[in-house]
Image (tube, coloured by chain):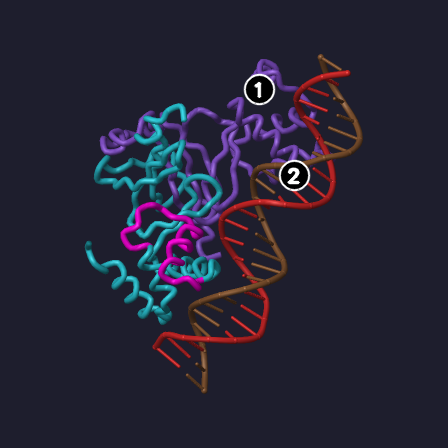
Chain colours: A purple, B cyan, C brown, D red
Amino acid sequence: MAGGRYLEDVVRRLKETGLKVTPQRLAVIRCLEGNSSHPSAEQIHRAVTRSFPTISLATVYNTLETLERIDAVRSMYLTGGRRHYDPETRPHHHAVCRRCQRIEDVFPETGGPVPVPATVRGRFAEVTPMVLYRGTCADCASFSSS
Amino acid sequence: MAGGRYLEDVVRRLKETGLKVTPQRLAVIRCLEGNSSHPSAEQIHRAVTRSFPTISLATVYNTLETLERIDAVRSMYLTGGRRHYDPETRPHHHAVCRRCQRIEDVFPETGGPVPVPATVRGRFAEVTPMVLYRGTCADCASFSSS
DNA sequence: CTTAGTGCAAAGGCTTTGCAGCAAT
DNA sequence: ATTGCTGCAAAGCCTTTGCACTAAG
């Protein structure tokens, strides 16, 4: 595996900002590293619990907020009323399955840049477009009636 | 004003589906007609309360769910954990202010169709792209430090 | 009449907050 | 010693649900 580039980087930023590198934070960072499943806080908590049984859900939330402030994670509401966390902080798009809610990253390179219409440019500054491709994923399409 | 095209249309669809046209539902429909502010359920409730003081928030939620089923309104999580309702049910995009969370409709015609990358097309069927143009609106840009 | 819809209140998710105890300078 | 972090529990939003009452067709 790629081995800790993300972890190293986030740890460095924590230290630079004067924040502490606690075992709980390390566990959450490790859970996020290379994780493109866009987990919710609760999913992260469940996953981290396996290696760190005593970590509390509140600490996971606190840690995620801290990590978001140092740009180590990005949160978003893509589907439903729950927040999803993504360690990929570069601008990119998302494909979301209408049925199973699976979320996949879609990088701008694969589809070319998304133009910002003049009407939007005239009314908003520093516009970053983010596309949501809502569709039906292969798994769900094959079990179409289930 | 345009005068009731939306209302007429929704009332017709309610009847066709065998649903009742109650004063509460009419009040919610009137509140949605031509409303492009993407209100939350609570905002709709507050607005409707002015003309219909006894309507309950639960009824507003129930009504919105009913209206969404007959495709008279579309709900979405664009920003934060609250649901926003939009009487515009044709596919379109949204511009959202990073600061004040104001939401504006952006119609595909103004920016041309959004292409679906081959990678997405290969993994998802019936893909509908929806763009979120996140930026800073003119009002917020002028009060940049407030 | 009959059935669906309303309003109230309670319950349910998810997230945030307050605070005592603990850990790391 | 001082500061910040953790974990627990409670509180807070927003939304959904159960149920008796009411009203639409």
A24, above or below B31, in the image = above
Nearer-N-terminus badge (2/1):
1
Q: Position of residue B73 (x, y in %)?
A: 35, 54
Q: Position of residue A53 (x, y in %)?
A: 73, 35
**A133 or B71: nearer the viewer:** B71
Helix, strand or loop at label 2? It is helix
Span highlighted in magenta in the image? B32-55
Same chain? Circles 2 and 1: yes
The chain letter under disc 2 is: A
**A97 or A54: nearer the viewer:** A54
Q: List the residue tagged with mark 2.
A: A46
Q: Amino acid at mark 1?
A: Val
Q: Is residue B12 magenta?
A: no
Q: Amino acid at mark 2?
A: Arg
Q: How many callouts does the rendering have?
A: 2
Q: Quadrant of the C terminus of chain B?
A: top left
Mark drawn on residue A104: none
**C12 or B25: nearer the viewer:** B25
Q: Position of residue A97 (x, y in %)?
A: 44, 44
Q: List the residue tagged with mark 1.
A: A10
- For residue A18, which quarter of the picture? top right
Helix, strand or loop at label 1? It is helix
**A85 or B123: nearer the viewer:** A85
Q: Position of residue A133 (x, y in %)?
A: 38, 39
Determine the residue positioned at 45% across, 57% down.
B61
Q: Is residue A137 visible?
A: no
- Determine whether label 2 and label 1 are within 8 Å by CB: no
Residue count near mark 2 (Cα–Cα under 10 Å), binned few <14, some 14–19, many ≥20: some
